[in-house]
Image (cartoon, rainbow, N blue to C red):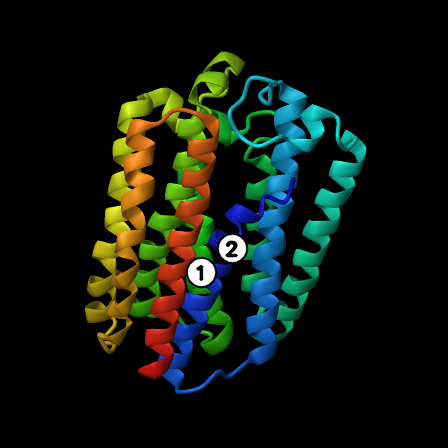
Amino acid sequence: MAARPRTLPAAIAPVLVGTAAAVNWAGDLPRWGAFFAALVGSIFIQIGTNLANDYSDAKRGADTADRLGPVRVTASGLVTPQRVMTATWIAFAIAVACGLYLWSVAGVGIFVIGLFSIAAGVLYTGGPRPYGYEGFGEVFVFLFFGLVAVNGSYYVQLEELDALPLGLSISIGFLAAAIIVVNNVRDVETDRRAGKNTLAVRIGRDRAVQLYKVLIGGGFLVLPIALVAGEASLLPLIGLLAAPLAIKPVKTLEERRDGPSLNAVLGQTGALLAVFSLLVTVGLLISA
């Protein structure tokens, strides 16, 4: 429950797309080990971040009994805070181990970036001044699960960067950030009472819903621009076939305020990102 499986597409999608972009350029996958290390590392950074968030929000009193989201294991007493923290550091330790391997094949820079990603995950709701409480959660997701993860996955294969992964990272980053927008729209009232000033609290629910629509639309709009800028085949435009999956979550987010409906939107947004990234990945691989 604390690992929040519905959010894991945000960790898997950028690695698939970034690696596929490298294959599209090179014609094959140069480093299978680097792909698996990047994938496992990304997943466990996400899990570690979710666990740290579960612990920190409970400690700060943000996860109260009247929140609309799923049960948080620390605040509800299902798991002791000490055990949640132990699980958090185990998850991050696995990510560090993956980073050490990537260091051995692609240089120390990629390891340092991984450490920054872990630190960002911890400080999202932890530390003396958590930036997630100041409205920067969406920026964190866009940067680390968009720009960093896609371009990093490309770099560990070819040890260079290019316009194609950069453009794709913006597309993936927009859709990943939409997931956190849903989370914050759902919890806007309880977060406001707890003093957790997420972006949804700062700009209001209606504007946050509009932001969600902009991010979803932007994710699809940037895709053809990325392909043209990267001088790639247009076959990955099959990712646009995922667009109809956005209709239901957008409509539900506009019209509903109950917990079950908004929790469903969270899962649907994660599924949208997953399908979009898989289709783009297939298109990149076929056109390699």
- Above or below, 263 relative to 27: above
> Can the viewer see residue 172 in this picture?
yes
**Residue 14, label in figure:** 1
Q: For this view, does 253 lie left or right of residue 260? A: left
Name the foreground residue: 119 vs 275.
275
| Residue density around tag 2, few if under 14, some if 14–19, many if 20 or more, within 10 Å | many
Residue type at numbered disc 2: Ala
* Residue 74: x %, y % from top left: 70, 29
In the displayed structure, does residue 100 sit left or right of residue 203? right
Dots 2, 1 in contact, CB < 8 A: yes
* Disc sitting over residue 199 in the figure: none
Q: How many marks?
A: 2
> Height in image: 178 above or below 200?
below
**Residue 142 visible (yes or no):** no
Q: Position of residue 102 (x, y in %)?
A: 61, 69
Left or right: 164 as drawn, with respect to 129: left
Residue behind mark 2:
11
- What is the quadrant of the C terminus in the image? bottom left
Image coordinates for residue 206, horizontal then vertical, percent = 27, 24
Instruction: Tell me the CA gap for discs 2 and 1.
Output: 6 Å
At x 47%, y 74%, the residue is: 159
Among all residues in the image, which is located at the extreme bottom? Answer: 27
Residue 146, placed above or below residue 126: below
> Residue 287: which quarter of the image?
bottom left
Residue at left 33%, top 70%?
A: 162
Task: Determine the secondary structure under disc 1.
Answer: helix
Q: Quadrant of the N terminus?
A: top right
Q: Residue at x 48, y 31 (%)?
A: 260
Pick the residue in front: 61 or 1: 1
- Name the element at disc 2: helix
How busy is the neighbourhood of tag 1: few (under 14 within 10 Å), some, or many (20 plus)? many
Q: Residue drawn 43% across and 53% down?
A: 271
